[in-house]
Every structure is written in structure tokens, then in C-alpha cells.
Amino acid sequence: MKTLTFLVVISLMAVAGVVASDYNYVSPEKVKTWIETQEPVTIVDIQVKEEFEAHHLPGSLATYSYPVKSDLEKAKIDDAVDASIDTETPVVVVCPRGAGGAQRCYDYMKSRNISEDRLLILKGGIAGWPYKELMESAK
């Protein structure tokens, strides 16, 4: 029985790994370089208002759309879609931890005709951002 349970857990982990690879991720190091060199990039931040005001990346578009589950939350991303649709720049989605909310935002932006080859999720989200000196706050 333990062997069967182990095999089921391993199988589920493998499936989860395949699903997770359906998204494009970008490292904090790469985003840091883009910010420092002022490379054209659209940073779409989906944190709730209080978290965004406490800490966000320079130049981020605040959407306050986390967790991006309802139609109302998705509609909050439309301004970012409009700002991105006619450009060729990378679009980096930033959420609290770079997981479900970011993936839902990515999927929504993709459904609104933002090319998937431009869509990226910040690996680890704002919680995994190691460059505190490059964070801003509205407080």
C-alpha cells in the first residue's frame, strides 16, 4: 500500500510539473537588469492595494486585481492589456508569490491577445524579490 501511495504522489508531482511549465517565467536578476538599464518592459502588478502601496517594483502598473478569479478582478487588468497590446515589449506579471494569481493574470492577458511569447511571470513573485533597494512604496 505504501508503494502505491508513493507512486500516486510521484505521478501527481510529475503532472504538476508539466502544468507549471506551461508558463514563461523570468528571474528576478533579469527584471533587475531591465529596470537598471531602463529597457522597455511592462510590469503588471496584481497585488492588492495595501500590499502594492507597501512594496512594488519601479514603473509597475497597479491593477489591484489579486487573486484574479472573478470577472471584476479580471476587468481590473484591462488597462494593462490596453497599454501592452500595441507594443512588442515583454510583459512581466508580478504577484505576491508568482503562483496562481500570476498564472490567472497571464491566462487572461493571453486570452485578450497579448502574445504568449511576450508574457512572463516574475519567478517567486514580490516575496521572492531579493533586491529590496529597487522596491518602492506609496507610503
Image (spheres, rainbow, N blue to C red):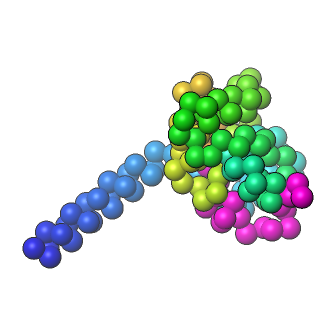
Q: Quadrant of residue 123?
A: bottom right
Residue 41 location in percent, x, y?
77, 42
Name the residue: 73% across, 69% down: 130
For the question of whether residue 42 can be seen, the reply is: yes
Name the residue: 54% across, 27% down: 111
Q: Which region is colored magenta? A: 121-139
Residue 42 location in percent, x, y?
76, 40
Relative to 37, say whether 80 is above or below: above
Name the residue: 86% across, 58% down: 137
Relative to 130, say whether 60 is above or below: above
Taking the magenta stretch, the answer to whether it contains residue 130 is yes
**Camera-nearest residue between 50 and 134:** 50
Identify the image quadrant of the N terminus. bottom left
Q: Quadrant of residue 63?
A: top right
**Camera-nearest residue between 33 and 1:** 1
Left or right of 72 on screen, residue 32: right
Left or right of 87 on screen, residue 118: left
Extreme-left residue of the structure:
1
Residue 28 location in percent, x, y?
70, 60
**Camera-nearest residue between 124 and 36:** 124
Name the residue: 74% across, 29% down: 79
Relative to 98, say whether 74 is above or below: above
Residue 16 location in percent, x, y?
37, 55
Relative to 94, say whether 12 is above or below: below
Taking the magenta stretch, the answer to whether it contains residue 2 is no
Identify the image quadrant of the C terminus. bottom right
